[in-house]
Image (cartoon, grey):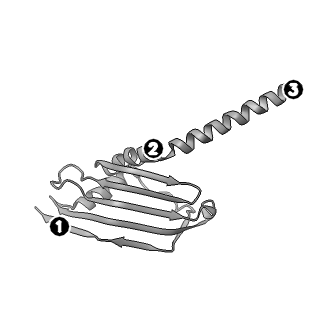
Amino acid sequence: MKKFGIALFILITLITGMLFWLRDNLDGLVRDAIVKYGGQMTQAKVSIGNLKIDAVNGECVISDFIVGNPKGFKTPYAFKVDKFTVALDPATIADDVVTIRKIAILEPEVIYEKGDGMTNFDAIQKNIADYMGPSDSAPSASKKLIVEEFAMIDTNVFGYLY
């Protein structure tokens, strides 16, 4: 019985340590994943200045978020956002319908560039579709989202034709 108690104590200590490590490193892990996989999917540089997750309240704040342009476009980026906030109801995360309490996009800048035969957003969309692969299979059951509040403030849109 004593060995079982020691093993249980060690297991609980390991799990607690892993949870504390995850709590302290979650922001960096998510930030790195968005930059890495976002860049691979879009074939454009993706950068994030800062990312902060409050898992208890279901809120994520991203600042200085930039999606560059794929090769062949002249402008420095397709869009950038000064601050992007998403707040969801954590109680609904495992449900079929996830409630997003708020999406707030502050000071976005969009640069729409028409190059040879397509726009930068067409190229990004095509790159994402190529990355995701063919969707020949039957539609699968997916989560539904309810967005209670959406705000986009101080938007700047620029267009360039070459």
Gap between marks 2 and 1 measured at Cα: 34 Å
**Which residue appears at 33% of the width and 55% of the height?**
65
Q: Residues within 10 Å of mark 1 (few under 14, many from 20)?
A: few
Position of residue 53 measured from the top left corner of the image (x, y, whole percent)? 50, 53
Q: Are marks 3 and 2 in contact (CB under 8 Å)?
A: no
Q: Which residue is mark 3?
A: 2
Position of residue 34 measured from the top left corner of the image (x, y, whole percent)? 41, 49
Mark 2 or mark 1, which has the lower sequence index? 2
Q: Which residue is mark 2?
A: 28
Q: Residues within 10 Å of mark 2 (few under 14, many from 20)?
A: some
Q: Which residue is mark 1?
A: 159
Q: Is residue 159 above or below residue 130?
A: below
Left or right: 52 with respect to 157?
Answer: right
Position of residue 91 measured from the top left corner of the image (x, y, whole percent)? 63, 63
Q: Residue 16 versus residue 144: which sits nearer the camera?
A: 16
Identify the image quadrant of the C terminus. bottom left
- Could you tell me the amino acid type at mark 1? Gly
Q: Secondary structure at mark 2?
A: helix
- The answer to which image quadrant residue 23 occupies is top right
- The answer to which image quadrant residue 94 occupies is bottom right
- Could you tell me the amino acid type at mark 3? Lys
Question: How many numbered tags mark residues here?
Answer: 3
Left or right: 86 with respect to 46?
Answer: right
